[in-house]
């Protein structure tokens, strides 16, 4: 028998104990990392801790997301705005529309309707995202409270 055998056996037990301690530390660090990553992506936490930054960010996003209206053109000279005669205004063209109807009006109405739909859709998505993230946060906090 080698006189060092009991010493090797003790060192093997020490290594096992150290490995067990390291495994416990890894689990603790992993749990902490998960908590920190949840906090990092929780927009409500950031708004609560920094409300002015949240307000300015929302204003900036709204400014860049909302489409700008068409640029206004200068008024045409008075000669070009002469009123058509009664015969010309009543006579429809080949499409069945009168010459005085403006395609710009239809385009403006369609643009307003599109903008309203876009805003309503974004509001709906924001509400649903808030509910989803809130339920995830509640589930995460419930997991933290219940011991496993």
Image (spheres, rainbow, N blue to C red):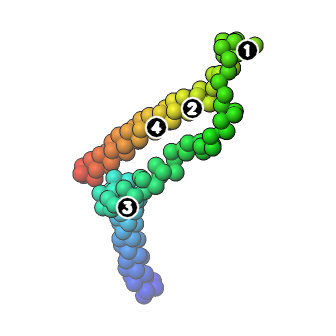
Q: Nearer the viewer, residue 46 or 61?
A: 61
Frontmost residue, 67 versus 145: 67
On the image, numbered disc 2 is attached to which residue?
A: 108
Find residue 80 and report its image quarter. Answer: top right
Measure the C-alpha gap from mark 3 to mark 1. 57 Å
Disc 1 residue crowd, few under 14, some 14–19, many 20+, Cα 10 Å: few
Q: Which residue is drawn at the image coordinates 62% and 30% (left, top)?
A: 104
Q: x%, y% of residue 16?
A: 39, 71
Looking at marks 1 and 4 on the same chain, the residue that comes earlier in the sequence is marked by 1
Residue bearing the label numbered 4 = 119
Residue 93, labelled with which disc?
1
C-alpha gap between disc 1 and disc 4: 37 Å
Which of the two marks, 2 or 1, is nearer to us in this view? Answer: 1
Image marks 3 and 1: residues in contact by CB distance under 8 Å: no
Q: Position of residue 97 (x, y in %)?
A: 67, 15
Secondary structure beneath disc 4?
Answer: helix
Quarter containing the N terminus: bottom left
Q: Residues within 10 Å of mark 3 (few under 14, many from 20)?
A: few
The local crowd at label 4, few if under 14, some if 14 to 19, many if 20 or more residues have their Cα within 10 Å, is some
Few, some or many C-alpha atoms within 10 Å of disc 2 (few <14, some 14-19, many ≥20)? few
Q: Quadrant of residue 4?
A: bottom left
Mark 3 and 4 residues: CB-CB less than 8 Å, in contact?
no
Give the mark nearest the N terminus, 3 or 1.
3
Question: For this rendering, which residue is in front, 22 or 102?
Answer: 102
Residue 53 disc label = 3
């Amino acid at each position: 028998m080698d006189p060092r055998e009991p010493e090797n056996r003790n060192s093997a037990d020490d290594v096992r104990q150290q490995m067990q301690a390291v495994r416990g530390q890894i689990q603790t660090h992993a749990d902490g990392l998960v908590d920190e990553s949840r906090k990092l992506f929780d927009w409500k936490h950031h708004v609560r801790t920094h409300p002015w930054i949240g307000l300015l960010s929302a204003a900036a996003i709204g400014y860049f997301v909302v489409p700008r209206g068409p640029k206004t053109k200068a008024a045409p000279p008075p000669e070009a705005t002469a009123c058509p005669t009664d015969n010309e205004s009543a006579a429809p063209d080949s499409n069945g529309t009168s010459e005085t109807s403006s395609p710009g009006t239809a385009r403006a109405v369609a643009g307003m309707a599109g903008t309203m739909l876009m805003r309503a859709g974004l509001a709906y998505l924001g509400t649903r995202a808030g509910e989803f993230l809130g339920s995830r946060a509640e589930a995460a906090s419930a997991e933290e409270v219940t011991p496993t």
